[in-house]
Amino acid sequence: MAGRYATALFDLAREANAIDQVKADVERFDGLIAESSDLARLVRSPVFSADEQLHALTAVLDRAGIGRLAAQFLKLVTANRRLFAARDMIRGYRELVAVHKGEATAEITVAEKLKDDHIAALKSALKAISGKDVDLDIKIDPAIIGGLVVKLGSRMIDTSLRTKLNAIKHAMKEAR
């Protein structure tokens, strides 16, 4: 279901020559959901009626300055009672844009927010490996303690401290 909505949004954005603008807008909305537990609850909870969700969502979209096509799409999703799947739709849209532009998408998990120069260095290193421009989907998970986990296509590199500590723990158990 999320894939169908993502494809429909991509087709509309392509017709309107607004692929990048829509991508920026839906990513801004995705970031707002990630930052606000109240907005995440509004998006996921079936307790709120479609009208309540639509009223609250309209205020959030206006305040965030999210553009016309993306706002219309999110309002339609809300009216259809599919807002709970918005993050999956956004992820699907990102993938369609990446394929359209010949880019690769890398999922990056870090313990804390990365600085801009670190993001640029990471993009550069991943571009050297893949030979394509790389779009980063960065998730923050304090549970990994430090380091990062990178998923690029079928490859995964886990340099998190949690994984290293678990490896040491297992090695110490085997040594006994």
Image (spheres, grey):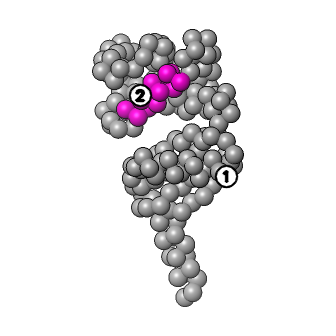
Upstream in sequence: badge 1 or badge 2: 2
* SS under mark 1: helix
- Residue 52 among those drawn in magenta: no
Residue located beneath label 1 in the image: 129
Q: Which residue is drawn at 61% across and 11% down?
A: 15
Q: In which quarter of the image is residue 12?
A: top right
Marks 1/2: CA distance? 30 Å
Q: Which residue is drawn at 41% across and 28% down?
A: 29
Give residue 131's position: percent from left, percent from top. 69, 46
Q: In this view, does 43 lie above or below 141?
A: above
Q: Tell me the quarter of the image containing the C terminus.
A: bottom right
Determine which quarter of the picture holds residue 101.
top right
Evaluate whether residue 151 shows in this view. Answer: no
**Quarter in which the N terminus is drawn:** top right
Q: What residue type is labelled 2?
A: Phe
Residue 154 percent coordinates (x, y): 69, 49
Examine the rendering and report whether any part of residue 32 can be seen: yes
Residue 49 locus on image (x, y percent)? 37, 17
Instruction: Please give left or right for residue 104 compared with residue 67 in the image.
Output: right
Q: Residue 113's mark?
A: none
User: Is 113 drawn above or below residue 93 in the view shown?
Assistant: below
47 displayed left or right of 136: left
Q: Are marks 1 and 2 in contact (CB under 8 Å)?
A: no
Find disc 2 in the rendering and name its residue.
29
Identify the magenta region: 20-33
